[in-house]
Each structure stands twice: as C-alpha cells, then as structure tokens.
C-alpha cells in the first residue's frame, strides 16, 4: 500500500549547503543526504558497511562522506573509496545509493527500483522561483501514517473546528461550501467554493478586505504532493471566472513523505502574491501556526487507530477528494506489485 | 481472568460538572464520560466513527459530545446526531455507549454485555453521604495489574515495612496480629485484630490516645470494591464487642478498575467519624501519603513479574484473604466464560 | 552465543561497604549484590519469592537481606530465614543465589551452572594492588551488545577518528601501524606498534616527552576481560626490546559484562606507572573522557544494527584481533552447548 517507485520530497535545496549533510529516514530506510564541496547532491544509506555506524555522524570530505568511527570513505554512488588501515578495497564494502534530483528548490529522492527513476517524472512547482510569488519553506514531523495527513488537507471542513483562530473563518460558510471533485491526468482535483462569506482573520490582515468575499479552495493531488490554491476576492469581482490578480492568493505545497509505517515527514511551503516582506512574513507565520494545530490532531488519531487497527473508518461527504486520492495511490501500489510479480516470474 | 460483566468504579460524581467530560481507559477500551448541560451522565467510546479522533479532545454541546476535528456530534447512546457537511446520517456512523449509573457519589460503568447490566446490582456505600461521617475522594494511577493492588490491601502485614511513618504503628503488633478470614454472600471478609498495642502516629493525632489501644482492621471484599474498616479504642473498652463510637474509626473504599493488562485506576475514598474539618483534613492527607507509598512498590513488583511472567509466586499466611478474593474473581470470570460459550452454541 | 559458564566482572570491591547492596542485571537476570555487616559478599536474585518485590529496594540486616514489602529475609545462599507473619518457612520460599568471588579488588560472579564454578579460574589482575602502579576504578553503561565493545577496543584504528583530542595522537601513525595477532593459551594477543611518532596530548602531559616516541599497544584478551597495555618511550630507547621502565606505561582493564541482549556493563580500570597523584588523576580523567567518547558511538551502531539485524557486517584488516576474539567466544559457547546436550541425554 506504500508505492516506492515514485519521487518523494526529501527536503528543500536551501537546507543543504556545500559539504553539508542531513540524516533522514524514508520508507523505513535510514538515508544520509550530502552535498559535496563542489555542490553536487547525493543520497546513500546511512550505515557504514564495516560496523553499521551511521555515516551521518561523520563528515563530508571533498566528494566523499567519511565514517566517523574508522574513517572509511564512500562516494555518492556508494562506492567505498578508502579504508585507512589497508590498501585493498573489498568489493563488498560498497553501500546503497539512491537517485536524487534537485528542481524548483526541491530535493527529490527515489526509494524504489533505480532503473525506473525517470529524472523528469516528478511534479513541477515553478512558483517557488517565480518573482510574482513570495515563498517560505518549512517542515513538521508528524507521528502518524501519511494517509492521515492526506485526509487532513483534502477534507477542509475541519477548518471551522481546528483552525477557527487562523484560517478557519466563518463556520457557517464551511457547512454550505460548494464542492466538486474530478480526476485529473495523474491525480485528483477538488474545487471548493465559499461564495459571499466573512473573510478569515488571516485574509483581512493580508489584503485589508472591508466586506464579504468570494473564497476558493482548490486542492490538487499531483502524486505524491498536494497543492492547495486558496484565496479570496471582493464579492462578485470575478473570483470564479479566473480573475484573481486583484485578490489575495495563497499556494501551499504539502509533501508527505513516509518516514516509517507510523510517522511521516510533512514538508511544506507557502507561496503568496503578497510581496510586501512584512505582510508575507505574517502570512507564513500564520500558516506555520495553522499546520502546527493539525500535528497533535493526527497524532491522536493515529494512537486511536493503533488501539485496534482492524476497525473500519466511515467516510463522509467531504471526504470525496481524499477517497479519490486513496484510489490513485492504491492503483500506483498495485501497478508496482504487478511489476514485482512479473520480475519474479 | 478479567470479569467484564460487573459494575466498575469509573470516577466520583463530584469530578464531573455539567458539560464536563473526562477520558479514561477501562479494560483496554478508551471511554469518554460526559455530562450534558442538564446534568445527565453518559459514557461512550472515545473514538469518532469517521476518522478515529478521540472525542474527549472535543466538547459537550447541549446533550451531545462534538468531535473536535470535523464537528460530528453524538448523543449519550452513541447515536450520530449531526455531520456538518451533509444532511444524511449513515446508520454506520453510530458509536458504542456503555451503561453508567450514579449512586452514593460514585460513577459506575458496565464494560461487558449491556443486556446483563442490572442498575441495582452494584455495591452500596451510604457512608459517603452519611452526616455522621466525613469523606474525602481521590485517585492514583498504578502501573500494575489490579490483582497486585488487591494483594496489597489484603495483606496488611506490609504496614510495618512500607508505612512505618504513617499508619504502620508498632511492628511487633503486626507480627502477632490475630486474623480470621471468612467467605461472605458475595465476597470475602478478613478480621484482623491488634489488641493492646501502641497507637500509630495518625491515630494519636486524630483522637489524642494517651495509652495503648485495641486496634481492628476489617477488610471486606464486596466485588469489585474493597472496604477497609479500621480504628482503635482505649484498651478493653469494647472495641471487639461492637462498641466503637467513642473510639476512632476509619472507612477506606478501595476501587481498583483495570485500565490495561498492566495498569490500573486506583479510586479511593476515606471516611472518618472525626468531623472536625482540620483534624479530618490531616487524616485524609495522611491517607494520601500512605497510599502514595504503595504506588512505587506495586510498580516495582509488576516490572519484576514482567521479567518472567511464567514464574510462580508463593503465598504466606497473611495472604489468606487475598487468596480467597482471587477465587471469588476466578469464579466470576468462569461464569462469564460459560455464558459466552452457551451464547455461541 | 553468550557463554554463561564463566566468571564475569560484577563490580569493584571498593563500591560495596559493609551492609551495602547494589542491584544489577547480568545476562538478563536481575541480581542483588550485598555485603553482610561482617563484610561477606553475596549475590542472590533480586526478586522475593513471595510477591516478586525487588529485594534491592530493601536493606541488609546482619547476615540477611530483607524484603522491603513484607519483611521476609534471605541469607546469602538464598535460604529464606524469616517470614514475619508465620513460624513455618515453606521449602519453596528460597531464592536463587550466585557464586561470587572477590580477588584483586574485583567482584566476580558466575551466572551459569554453579557446579562448574571453579573459584580459582578467573583471570588475575595483580596490578590493582601493586605499589608500583597507581589505579583508578570506574564504570560506564553502554546501550549495545557487548560484542560491539570488544570490537571497539580491538580495532584501535578508531583512535584517530573518535579520540583525536585525547589519546588519538598523530592520525598518519595509525594508518601505518605494524600489527601482529596471535592466539594465546586462553585468548588472543594483538601487538600494535607505532614507531617514531608524535606523542599524543595525554602522553606529553604525563611524561614530558620533548620529541618523537616509539609507542606500543598490546591488546590481550583473557576471557572475558581485555587488558590494553600501552605507552611510549623516547625513540630508539628499547621500547620494543622490553625496556619500558623509563617510559610511560598505561594498563587498562576493560570488562564487558552483558546486562541484556542489547545493553552492557562497561567496567574499567586504568593503571599507570606515574605515581604522582596529580599527574595520575589527570591521566584517569583523560581516560574517562576517552571512553566516554566511545559510548555514543556504540549506541548509534546498535541502533543501526537493530534496524535490520539480518544484514551482514564486513571485516577490515584492523579487525584481525577482534575476529580471533569472536572465535574464542564462539568456541566457549559451543563447548557449553555440548555440555548442556550431554546432560540432557
């Protein structure tokens, strides 16, 4: 149920300078991401072949990562370059490496079959580097299965309950929201409209709305990431006909990468068409607070699910998008299982 | 070995005001107790049928408990009353409810087959509301199987070792204690007499004894609770002939409700015939300290038992009451297993 | 793979005064070591036969250890001496005792078949009480299998990486080290020579070397302990011909006693021919810091091994001694398994 043959977000480019390294577990495997002195990015397993020491406790030396215990060095393909106490390097001394690609300020990693890793097949996110948008990069660790994070962003009816002090806004508006779900080429798109409603606190602070607004929330599942387009314009000024430049726009990138079967990386960025640094900073801070409100919620859910994983959950109307997304993921996992089977034959 | 078809103490009435709620696990199941705005008490499973969110993180709204995540509401019978994003309520949206009864300031819960829950079958404890007695209500969480707590209160020979600074009193007296154990209609009664002994610190503080006293300790197992009647009178003034009004009397209610297989709720109250508020408060504080001394002891026992649960324990003479109580519980569990079997046929 | 039929270090004599006790787990079994008021040392299981209470929470009373819960007393052979509430002592009330021997300021314990415990068969370590040497006794708790600690002291090529600020010295010297491994009567000896090298910081502080020195490191596995002889003399003054009195000598005793399958006791002493108390204290402090640097390393290794215990480790040239030591241990374990088998037939 966990597709391995796809690109996952492994971090943000800005987090890893020359000769930097970071340890992260992805899909249960310990990985160390490192950048050479020349700036090239690599990912190898975070385990020395000699005595299982985590390489991430060591350091980057030129093009190599050096084990902190006995000084054994490996390059970005996992090849063992040097064993200080001997001349011969045994062929079994190599370690596993993982395909990585950097694009749109995002570090992508491929945890599955390297032969299938098409370096152009990941989603694009050009808004990170578009001067018409201002962007902010951050991260939360979530103690839950990634599927609970997917559910969270797809069913925005929780805004009225979990986020009333930030982006929730008028509760009544959420109950009457118009929602339409459709399959896209690769994923799912949910259009959610809240016409003629009170602007949330965040919106007023950002754009100075005086009266009621037409809000939109468009949730786009572009596996494995989710984009949430949201914003508002003064009522009747064209928000639902594509005229949004005069309004307030937010674009959230939500990338949930499984860490273990019970924990997830929640990489997220927020972009806005508000370029004023102070206003933008306030929006990003609000987003950080808002997502921070979800983290204990999904943890509590996971604990209750773990009490008896055999019990079923029921779906409600506002889960339509999340249910579709689960089907997309299940199809990817099924295709992967079939490939594995045909290889075995 | 854990009877489910009986009333267990779930808390004290005073702990739960109108619109209040409290989350507690009983017999491995997560439960939320809540009181409606009108004061009616309910217990339902602490898990929303939608996405397994703990309802106890939500709030009581009128007659309902509302999930904090998406606002779904349930009444005290577990019926789903409202799903904010839709009109139709699917029949599978209901959750489990548990019979609860309030009596003698005690909240009782029935975790087994609801059809067997006779609302008059729990032990009575009228002293809580008797003006001749002053009572205090409290709670400890114990990291052990409830059986270890039963053993603890039945074998009072531990008073001399664990509680010398509080209710232990003269160690020599404990070794020579006269003890008699007998079966009652439903449970077990242990009579323990310590005639002509030094009064413990607590007793002197409460009643001002000048010389030696005749002490009694009567441990009454009225499943699933235990009452400990204890106290003392000046030597030879009728303590063992039922003339105790002139002496010092304590009545402890010890209710051990299993939380999990390895942890227990220790609900306890202490009542005394000392009505002076300051003196009574001192007694209650001493009791709190005393029971607090047992908590690390039973935790250490449990840890050692968990080291190798297959190893046997030996019984000593002073375990007579505890051994009888174990048989009573085993008989209840056996009868329950037979009922389950006959239902299955 | 864990030989039980051998003497293990259980502590240092100086740690346990008259009427003292200490709780320690060895080879997964909870043990309490206690010394009677007369100074005799005993080891019994740390579990009362009555209700599994840890005896180590109690106290030593004369020749006995008394359970803190109900006052039951046991002597050093595990015989139950007294049950406060009764006269008869049931024969099943006894607990297990373990052979212990004190020698060379070391407490030795035998966790296996007591019939095989030859009280003269443990390694000797006379330097502890030799006035030509100054000694220091200490302990670390290590969250790893004891084998990782064996590997650590046998492969000293890690000195250059983990201990550059203390005993590591010139990294280049370590790569060119001459090493010879040979089997001894009972164990393994590794001779490691670093001729004509820069003295490490510790050495200069101790002996005031002005120029380069001839260093030696001799690692002696005398099951189950390891001695590391190390030191240095001015270049060409006889270090490798046995003339070392004019130089600087260290003798470390490293005793790794398994606590559980995943944790170990690291008992260690350091002896030196530097008798000046202030200089010696500085050396001992340096040793404490140095070994302290290894503790997080072995913990990280163990965590990574636990990720997937089925994965193999590779050996490098400098593991020669450690590999031999593993074979010695495997042979001991095999002999023990054969004895168990022949007993069963």
Image: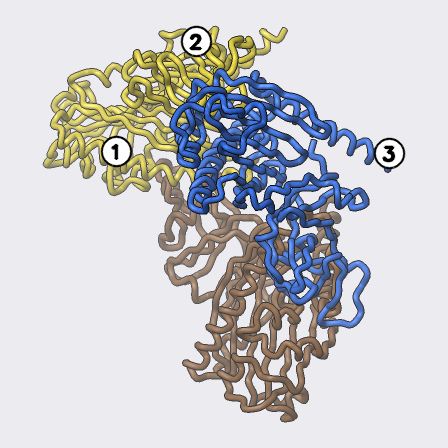
Chain colours: A yellow, B brown, C blue
Q: Is residue C26 left or right of residue A34?
A: right
| Residue, disc 3 | C342
The x and y percentages for residue B71 are 36, 42
The chain holding disc 1 is A
Query: In the structure shown, which secondary structural element does the residue marked by tag 2 occupy?
Result: loop
Query: In the structure shown, which secondary structural element does the residue marked by tag 1 occupy?
Result: helix
Q: Is residue C151 left or right of residue B221?
A: left
Q: Residue at x 25, y 33 (%)?
A: A287
Q: Is residue C321 above or below residue B336?
A: above
Q: Are marks 2 and 1 on the same chain?
A: yes
Q: Is residue C85 above or below residue B68?
A: below
Q: Residue at x 43, y 21 (%)?
A: C171
Whole-angstrom CA distance, mark 2 to mark 1, is: 33 Å
The chain holding disc 2 is A
Give the mark toward the camera: 3 or 1: 3
Q: Earlier in the sequence, mark 2 or mark 1?
A: 2
Whole-angstrom CA distance, mark 3 to mark 1, is: 71 Å
| Residue, disc 2 | A117
The chain holding disc 3 is C
| Residue, disc 1 | A287
Q: Residue at x 36, y 7 (%)?
A: A120
């Amino acid at each position: 149920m966990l597709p391995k043959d796809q690109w996952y977000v492994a971090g943000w480019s800005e987090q890893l300078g020359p000769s930097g390294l970071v340890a992260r577990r992805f899909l249960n495997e310990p990985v160390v991401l490192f950048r050479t002195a020349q700036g090239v990015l690599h990912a190898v397993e975070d385990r020395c072949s000699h005595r299982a020491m985590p390489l991430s406790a060591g350091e980057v030396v030129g093009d190599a990562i050096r084990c902190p215990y006995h000084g054994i060095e490996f390059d970005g393909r996992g090849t063992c370059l040097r064993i200080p106490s001997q001349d011969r390097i045994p062929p079994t001394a190599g370690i596993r490496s993982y395909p990585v690609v950097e694009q749109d300020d995002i570090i992508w990693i491929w945890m599955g079959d390297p032969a299938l890793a098409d370096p152009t097949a990941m989603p694009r996110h050009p808004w990170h580097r578009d001067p018409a948008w201002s962007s902010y990069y951050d991260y939360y660790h979530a103690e839950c299965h990634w599927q609970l994070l997917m559910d969270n962003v797809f069913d925005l009816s929780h805004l009225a309950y979990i986020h009333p002090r930030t982006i929730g806004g008028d509760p009544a508006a959420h109950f009457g929201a118009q929602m339409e779900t459709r399959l896209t080429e690769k994923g799912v798109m949910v259009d959610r409209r809240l016409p003629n409603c009170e602007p949330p606190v965040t919106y007023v602070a950002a754009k100075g709305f005086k009266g009621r607004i037409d809000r939109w929330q468009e949730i786009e599942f572009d596996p494995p990431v989710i984009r949430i387009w949201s914003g508002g314009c003064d009522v009747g000024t064209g928000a639902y006909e594509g005229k949004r430049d005069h309004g307030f726009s937010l674009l959230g990138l939500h990338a949930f990468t499984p860490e273990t079967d019970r924990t997830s990386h929640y990489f997220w960025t927020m972009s806005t068409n508000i370029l004023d640094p102070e206003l933008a900073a306030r929006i990003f801070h609000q987003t950080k607070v808002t997502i921070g409100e979800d983290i204990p919620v999904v943890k509590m859910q996971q604990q209750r699910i773990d009490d008896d994983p055999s019990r079923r959950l029921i779906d409600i109307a506002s889960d339509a998008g999340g249910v579709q997304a689960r089907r997309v993921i299940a199809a990817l996992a099924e295709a992967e299982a079939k490939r594995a089977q045909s290889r075995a034959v």
